Amino acid sequence: MTNRILRWGLLSTARINRSLIPPLRASPRNRLVGVASRDPARAEAYAREWNIERAFGSYEAMLESPDIDVVYISLPNSLHAQWTIQALRAGKHVLCEKPLATRVEDVDAITATAAAAGRVVAEAFMYRHHPQTLQVKSLIERGAIGEVRLARGAFTFTLTDHANVRMNAGLDGGSIWDVGCYPINYARTMIGAEPVEAFGMQFTGPSGVDETFVGTLRFGEDVYAQFDCGFRAPFRMHMEIVGSEGLIVVPRPFKPTARETIYIGKAGDRLEPLTIEGPEWLYLGEVEDMADAILEGAAPRVSLKDSRGNVAAILALLRSAHAGRPVEV
C-alpha cells in the first residue's frame, strides 16, 4: 500500500474546497480526480474551473466509481453523518469537514460503519496538524506551565447574509457548530480530558440559530475552559492556556499561517515569543494524515473517539443554554 497514490473526490462544490485543492495537488501520495454535485452542469463547470478531470452529476455516482478512493465531504452540517456513512458503505475512506456529526448517536454509527467497512474516517480539524498546535501540546506535556488550570479562547466573525447556510437551523447551522467547535476542541486537546459539566448562554437571532454563544466547561475540581463564539462581532481568534506555573498565549490558534509566534512565560515573568514555522498550505497536514492512516496504517490524529467527545461537549452546552442551568456532559 505504501507506493499507492490515493485518488480523491470532492463531494460537493462548497467554497471550503478551494482550501483543500492546492495541498492535494502538492502531495505526492494524493491526487484530486473528481468532483460531485447534485447538478450535473454545476459539476462540469466546477471541474473546468479547477481543472479536475472527472465531474459526477450526483453524489451517488461518485460513490459508485471505482476510480475514487477517498472522498472529502464539505456539505452542510446536517448531511455530514448521512453521506459519511454512505461513502463508507461504498468502500470509500472519508475526510469530513467539522463537525463530523451533530448527534452522538451518529458518531457512534459512523464508528461502527467504518469498522465494518475497514475504512478510515477523520474529522477535518486542519489546525490540529499544524506545527504550532503540536508545539503547544508538547510544551504542556513537558510541564512548561505546570498543570493546566484554564483554557480560554474565542472565535468570532461578522455574518450579515441571512441566506448563508450557517444561519439555517434546518441544516444544523449556528455559531457553536461553525466556529465555537474550535476553541472547544482546542481546550479538550490541551487539557487532555473530557469535560464533566457544561454551562452555556446564547443569543438566538431571527434565523433560529445561536448567533452568539458563551460557554464554560468544567473538567475537574479545578480545571475549566471558557470561550465565546459568534457571527455578531468582528473577526477575532485567540487561545490562552493558563497553568499552575505559567501561561501560553496563541494569537492565531485555528488558522495559523506558515510562520506564527506564540508567547510563553512562568508566573510573574515577561512572556517570551516563540516563532514556529509551518507548511505553505494549512490543509496539507490533514491530507498527509489521511495518507498516513490509509497507506501506512497509522492512527488518524483526530480520532473518532475525539470527535465524539467534541460533539458531546457541544450538545451539553446547547442543552444548558436551553435549560438555563449547568448540565452534565
Image (spheres, grey):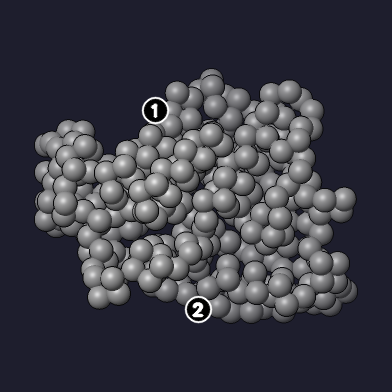
Residue at image mark 2? 277
> Which secondary structure lies at badge 2?
strand
Judging depth in this view, the residue of 164 and 72 nearest the camera is: 72
Percent x, y of residue 104: 56, 37
Name the amino acid type tagged 1: Ala
> Is any atom of residue 171 visible in this view?
yes
Q: Is 315 drawn above or below residue 67 in the view shown? A: above
Residue at image mark 1? 163
> Which secondary structure lies at badge 1?
loop
Residue at 79% x, 46% y is 218
- The CA span between labels 2 and 1 is 38 Å
Percent x, y of residue 234: 57, 45
**Residue 29 sits in which quadrant?**
bottom left
Residue at 38% x, 71% y is 296
Q: Looking at the rendered structure, which numbered label has been put on residue 250?
A: none
Nearest-to-viewer mark from 2 and 1: 2
Asked if residue 270 lies left or right of residue 169, the reply is right
Percent x, y of residue 83: 34, 38
Q: Which of marks 1 and 2 precedes in the sequence?
A: 1
Which quarter of the image is occupied by the C terminus?
A: top right
Q: Residues within 10 Å of mark 1 (few under 14, many from 20)?
A: few
What is the number of callouts on the image?
2
Q: Residues within 10 Å of mark 2 (few under 14, many from 20)?
A: some
